[in-house]
């Protein structure tokens, strides 16, 4: 689940005019929208220091609309990489180090299951304290973050319900199945 890439921060007054300014070195911004968010089943994985460092920065929305579906026998959330279709997706922005980014690539099955790519994320709320105040992005500005989305989905997934804010415990009744509870632990 991103738009300001390693060592860069984007600030914009026009939501489609993304400008980059220097920021924290060797850290990357990642936007998570699914099971890695606070309160979701895999949040402990992004907070596990043995995987590297991840620091919560704030909440955001994808600038473009995307279909976010829950699919497969394990009820996995997938952001289908079909810009302009679906909803603006709510999620969380994290600064991660190289070690955590590598862990996330493996965790997300990148590049086979998900592909990590840059996306524009509009800041809804910012809690990050790193950097000088003038370097902190303003609410409604746009950041470029890495986002794990997929182009390798089943064709019928396009017909599934689209969500704008994933919650494993939501009214949809499609609770995510943790890897340790699956028959095939690699999926």
Image (cartoon, helix red, strand yellow):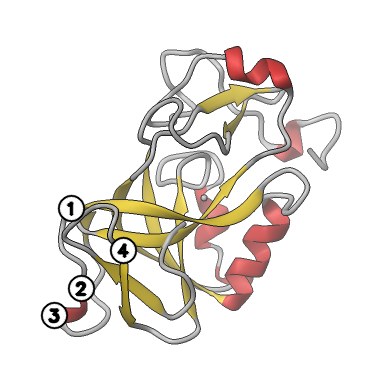
Whether tag 4 and tag 3 are in contact, CB under 8 A, the answer is no
Name the one closer to the observer, 51 or 59. Answer: 59
Whether tag 4 and tag 2 are in contact, CB under 8 A, the answer is no
Residue 172 position within the rendered picture, expressed as x and y whole percent measured from the top left: 47, 13
Which callout, 4 or 2, points at the residue further toward the start of the chain?
4
Which residue is identified by label 3?
134
106 relative to 42 in the view: left or right: right
Secondary structure at badge 3 equals helix
Residue that lies at the very extreme toward the right in this rendered image: 184
Mark 4 is surrounded, within 10 Å at the Cα level, by few (under 14), some (14 to 19) or many (20 or more) other residues, namely: some
Which circle marks residue 140 in the picture?
A: 1
Which callout, 4 or 3, points at the residue further toward the start of the chain?
4
In this rendering, the label closer to the viewer, 4 or 1: 4
Residue 123 position within the rendered picture, expressed as x and y whole percent measured from the top left: 25, 54
C-alpha span from label 3 to label 1:
15 Å
Which residue is identified by label 4?
18
Which circle marks residue 136 in the picture?
A: 2
């Amino acid at each position: 689940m991103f738009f300001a890439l390693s060592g860069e921060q984007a600030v914009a007054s026009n939501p489609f005019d993304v400008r980059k300014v220097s920021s924290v070195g060797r850290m990357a911004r990642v936007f998570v929208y699914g099971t890695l968010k606070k309160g979701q089943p895999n949040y402990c994985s992004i907070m596990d220091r043995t995987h590297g460092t991840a620091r919560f920065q704030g909440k955001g929305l994808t600038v473009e609309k995307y279909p976010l579906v829950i699919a497969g026998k394990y009820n996995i959330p997938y952001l289908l990489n079909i810009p302009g279709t679906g909803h603006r997706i709510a999620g969380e922005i994290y600064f991660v180090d190289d070690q955590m980014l590598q862990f996330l690539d493996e965790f997300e099955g990148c590049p086979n299951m998900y592909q990590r790519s840059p996306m524009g994320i509009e800041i809804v709320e910012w809690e990050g304290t790193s950097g000088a105040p003038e370097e902190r992005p303003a609410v409604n500005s746009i950041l470029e973050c890495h986002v794990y989305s997929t182009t390798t989905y089943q064709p019928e997934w396009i017909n599934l319900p689209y969500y704008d804010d994933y919650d494993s415990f939501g009214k949809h009744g499609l609770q995510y199945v943790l890897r340790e509870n699956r028959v095939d632990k690699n999926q």
